[in-house]
Amino acid sequence: MSTAAPAPLLRIRGLDTGIGRAGPLILYGVDLDLAPGEVLGVVGESGSGKSMLALSLMGLLPYPVAVRGGQAWWGERDLLTLPEAQRRALRGGEMAMIFQEPMSSLNPVMRVSQQLGEVLRWHRGLQGPAARAESLQLLERVEMPDPPRQLDSYPHELSGGMRQRVMIAMALAGRPRLLVADEPTTALDVTIQAQILELLRRIQRDEGMAVLLITHDLGVIAQMCDRVAVMYAGRIVEHGSALDIFDRPTHPYTQGLLASRPRLSAGSGWLTTIEGTVPAVGQLPPGCAFAPRCAHAGDDCGQVPALAPCGPGHWTACVAPARRTWAAATPTAASPLATRAAPPVAAVPVVPVVPAVPAVPALAAAPASGTAAPAPAAHQP
């Protein structure tokens, strides 16, 4: 007896976001589903529209950027048409967000206890000793060192990793069903990044939360996500399971991103790059936005490709993905999600012996004045 898939927690359909009412678009017809308890990764270069997608969902777009069309269904409610009071009640409660830079997101003149207490008061009705006790439990849950001391600290008195733990604690305070994490490890060193990612993964597993993880780090995507959406110039160009994206990429942009990862088997050769940059807002080329950077662009790329199925649960926006294969991306055994064994690394070539330094020629005799000539340097050419 088959079990029906759970209804999506969040359904985004045709989301358009742009500058003002008549300015250029930033997001073009974004379609995404997010199931309860699922981790969906959104990946792409800077300027692809990842953060604008998150801010559009949360209702936090900076003026004059605004949502211009589409729907974002949260159960039976369209987030994009909710009155601001209802949206504010959702934000921080059922939906929470971890921002990219905690130092610019935390209030510098409020202690940690005040900032956590504000969330608890608005969304759970806790005040006074009850709010302080819950705040301590939240800091302990995010593995904050010495929670009683840090609870009474100001943000500038904390390290970068501690500030990010405070942001995670604030996001969890309202017991959300959806956590939007916008580059949660960008400003942290590698060791702290690993700790934060492990913390997020453990909390997501324990709470059964859905997570929308925005990053440009493919390693983070491979470690955390069930499904992946690849964004370029405001559009979803490919999405599918993490295994499909890493092992069977079909869009040239996805293939280029994967090909640019450093590999131990590459030796001392040059890394593969995608030439050019993401086009600026309002300066998209006609047709496929990736065509000017694509080594396989053809005459048929003059039209904007729609997302089309290329496998079970796997969609791509390319007019002819079957014939467009980024040569450097074909060895999929290096995929961090591959189940088969990777081919053995080629032997490192023997470095030739450096030739001996030629002997230093004898110096000329000292001048007749009797002044001694200087001693030769040890490695004088």
Image (cartoon, rainbow, N blue to C red):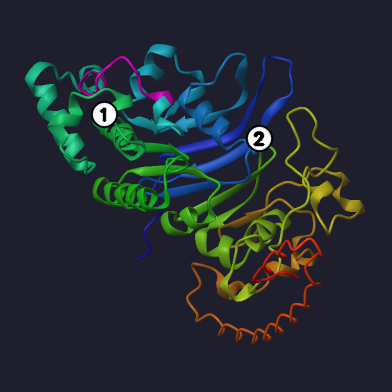
How many residues crowd around disc 2 within 10 Å: few (fewer than 14), some, or many (20 or more)? some
Q: Position of residue 140 (x, y in %)?
A: 17, 40
- Quarter of the image containing the C terminus? bottom right
Say above or below: 340 vs 56.
Answer: below
Name the quadrant containing residue 207. top left
**Identity of the amino acid at label 2?**
Gly
Most foreground residue, 237 or 113: 113
Q: Look at mark 2 in the image and give the residue it sits on.
A: 29
Nearer the observer, 163 or 171: 163
**How many numbered circles are shown?**
2
Residue annotated with mark 1: 174
Q: Nearer the viewer, residue 162 or 286?
A: 162
On whether residue 113 falls in the magenta region, the answer is yes
Residue beneath the point at 78% across and 42% down: 289
Spatial CA span between label 1 and label 2: 31 Å
Q: Amino acid at mark 1?
A: Gly
Q: Which residues are magenta?
A: 104-115
Asked if residue 33 lies left or right of residue 233, the reply is left
Q: Residue at x 61, y 67 (%)?
A: 248
Residue 21: image x %, image y %?
Answer: 69, 14
Rendering quarter of residue 84: top left
